[in-house]
Image (tube, helix red, strand yellow):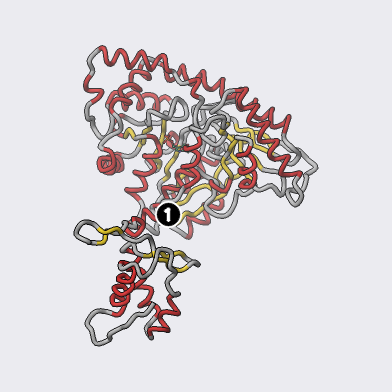
Amino acid sequence: MKLKLDRSLKTPLYLQIRDQIGQLILSQQLSPGYRLPPERKLAAQLGVNRTTIVNAYHELAADGLIQSHVGRGSMVCIHPTMNQDRIPIQPVSWQNYYSSQAERMHNPVLASILDEISEEDQISFALGAPAGEYYPLKELNEICKAMMHAGNWQAFAYGPTIGHLPLREYLADWLRLRGIKTQAQNILITSGSQQGLDLLTKIFLEPGDFIVMEEPSFLGAIGVFKTAGAHILTIPLDEEGIRTDILEQILSRRRPKFIYTLPTFQNPTGTTMSLARRHELLKLAYQFHVPIIEDDPYSELYYEQGPFPSLKSLDEHEHVIYLGTFSKMLLPGLRLGWCVAPTTVLEQLSLAKQHVDLHTSTTTQWIMTDFCNQGMLDQHLSLVRNQYKRQRDIMADTLTEFSPPGLSWVLPSGGYYLWCELPPGINATSLLRKAAEKKVSFVPGNAFHIHSGGKNLIRLCFCHHTEATIREGIYRLCTAISELLNQPSQGRPAHRHHYRETLV
Ligand SMILES: Cc1ncc(COP(=O)(O)O)c(C=O)c1O
């Protein structure tokens, strides 16, 4: 590849290099796959600075003519096609147009959990979803039929961004019964609580802001906060929830925008914050002027004593923003959640939501309003509390029956998940591969960590499948663990099969 630079021209050197290499590619003198000389080498050859070559290659990549990979150098891409006017049409290299925010979007775990649903024969303990068998389809069918019959066209029209008033009124009453002093005008209906998290992030976070969250924590929240470019300060959990002693040290040094917490039946650990810890957390929030985002999808699913008072219900000074959802207690497909916030925050959130989707589906809000007003939500909760408790116990009993020594888990007193520690030497990612051969899956613990932890932990959801399938899936999983343990160079057999008691 021969290039000639003319230093007497006004055209900068990097553009001369770009144009000459570009010409060689467009005239097909350089074929696809041709490896361009390393930047340093070409710089020496042409007697220019290395940055000149870096800039030239960058331009060529932006034009879609070359692709650069760290460690592999830069290669000529496919030849551009010519159109009728013999103008070369280059493929658009879309990545070069992405915003820095798009480049921070990276959550392959969540995407693969959702993709897996359609795979036949697969027993997924990964997906945190309610069992389809319990969806109240008959009742929903009656509601939809009645709605159509009555000619309620408004249920299919645009609606207010803040949400359908009768649904917000129902929720205000329902939350007041749970100690949360609120009213309809402080409730925003969201498209699932995932949207609530996204909207809160949009209105509060700039890249570089600090936030605090528990580690491990909900991977959907980690993804949103990382995409926003937040610096995440992590606080470990113990049996009583977030370690407020460590939080206090952090808050005395940093000023996070908010603390994100899951106090009840935490995802993924199942931990429930003690009452004393809830009060300590609120005290710290008041002392250091840090708002709290309380994410509470699971608190109605208690299998021993309950319900636990939410942080929001204990908050005397409007420091807590509260997220709720129908996804876990009823069904996720209607995509209905809500956010309770002080008036000014709610107005800002509504503005943000307007730009995202105008409002949550009117139709699903109308359906849910009728469902709730006919008393069916509370009926449904009684049903699923019984069923999920049985499923939790079946999963734990089957693990006791089949698990190889060294596996331990936490039996949660509510929620969706068993959080298991693998026998020493077994890595969750290797196990996932082995388990895939047996058509069973889970989420490896590292997905819930911001730092490098969780490699020997896995999360199993016991709500999504009914009893026989849970037994089959756990049998497959335990077989996969045993096979890994029996492989030479894999885990050291442990001598004790221990069982950690319920965390409350
Ligand atoms: C803690 C937590 N927050 C939010 C969500 C998102 O739920 P939704 O379906 O309401 O968007 C989940 C779902 O797994 C969750 O576990």
- Name the residue located 41 percent from the left edge and 14 percent from the top edge: 138
Q: Residue 10: horizontal and vertical position, in percent?
A: 22, 82
Q: Position of residue 18 (x, y in %)?
A: 31, 73
Secondary structure category for the residue under label 1: loop
Relative to 221, say whether 233 is above or below. Answer: below
Q: What residue sits 60% from the left and 33% below the top? A: 412
Residue 158 appears in view = yes
- Marks counted in the figure total 1
Q: Is residue 41 left or right of residue 484?
A: left
Residue 98 vertical placement versus 390 (above, below): below
Examine the rendered structure and indicate whether residue 329 appears above or below residue 54: above
Q: Nearer the viewer, residue 338 or 62?
A: 62
Mark 1 Cβ and ligand 1 under 8 Å apart: no
Label 1 crowding class (10 Å Cα cut-off): few <14, some 14-19, many 20+? many
Displayed quadrant of residue 207: bottom left
Residue most toward the right? Answer: 495
Kindly identify the amino acid type of the residue bearing the numbered disc 1.
Answer: Pro
The quadrant the N terminus occupies is bottom left
Looking at the picture, tell me which residue is in the foreground, 176 or 203. Answer: 203
* Quarter holding ligand 1: top left
Q: Which residue is mark 1?
A: 256
- Left or right of residue 180, residue 465 in this image: right
Tell me what residue is drawn at x 27 percent, y 85 percent: 6
Left or right: 97, with 380 as reference point: left
- Which of the pair 207/490 is nearer the observer? 490
Position in image of residue 60 (x %, y %): 33, 67
Depicted 145 relative to depicted 89: above or below:
above
Q: Quadrant of residue 405?
A: top right
Q: Please identify the quadrant where the C terminus is shown.
A: top right
The reply to whether residue 317 is in sight is: no
Residue 54 appears at what percent x and percent y?
A: 38, 73
Residue lying farthest to the left in this orientation: 85
